[in-house]
Amino acid sequence: MTISPARSRKPAEDRRRDIADAALRVIADDGLGRFTALAIARQVGVSDAALFRHFPNKEAIVLAAIERVEELLLDTFPPPGGDPLLRLGTFFRRRVSVIRSRPGIARLFASEELSRAAPPEGVARLATLRQRSMSFVGACVAEAAASGILARGVAAEEAALVVLGALLALAHSGAVPPGDSGDLPERVWRTLERFLRGPARPRHVARRPPRSEGRRTRSPKQR
């Protein structure tokens, strides 16, 4: 296999990231069950021998892919503060976008081969990511409820499950409905936000007193 000089001069850190990204693409196409060093090497454009100059074994490559997933998904969490439902919307959009653009992430989370292909540290890191995501959604909804933003009659626990279900369906199912123009995640979020906030509440407008109440009554001498 011919390797261009430009590619071979890449710094080791960049090369490791390239390999991790290639591993995610291979996982998306073939799954962990048929995850091979040769397939990754072809994706990166190096020989399989060169691949193992950066990683001691295939298990280490899977761990690097998990670390890359961790890096990508941690970037989807917005900073604290502000309206909790706006914060939740930012997270929802970012998370769906990242996972849809890299199908290997969803397949890695769902793989039954994960415990055999990855070291225990990698399995634990994915479990932590999953739990952190669920906790973030729950915390945003609970904060909205405590602030009086959540719609009347909508319980925080049920609302969090609805959001997580939509996120799972959009990001992890891999299915694109017929006729989807690409804005489905945005439309789904707008629907969710209407459900979470409820109908717009009318503003309280101070009533003006009748004019007669505001006028002074003149005495007969003043008439």
Image (spheres, rainbow, N blue to C red):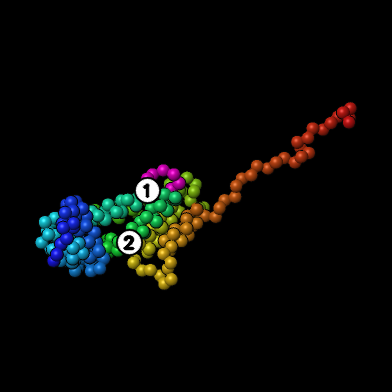
Q: Which mark is residue 78?
A: 1
Q: Quadrant of the N terminus?
A: bottom left
Name the front one of labels 1 and 2.
Answer: 2
The answer to whether one can see residue 153 in this image is no
State yes or no: discs 1 and 2 in contact (Cβ < 8 Å): no
Disc 2 packing (10 Å; few <14; some 14–19; many ≥20): few
Which residue has dot 2 on it? 101
Q: Picture quarter containing residue 33? A: bottom left
Residue at point 78%, 35% (across, down): 215
Residue 103 spot, x, y in % from top left: 30, 63
The answer to whether one can see residue 17 in this image is yes
Q: Which circle's residue, 1 or 2, is located before the other in the chain?
A: 1
Residue 54 spot, x, y in % from top left: 13, 55
Q: Magenta region: which residues?
A: 79-84
Left or right of 6, for residue 89? right
Q: Amino acid at mark 1?
A: Pro
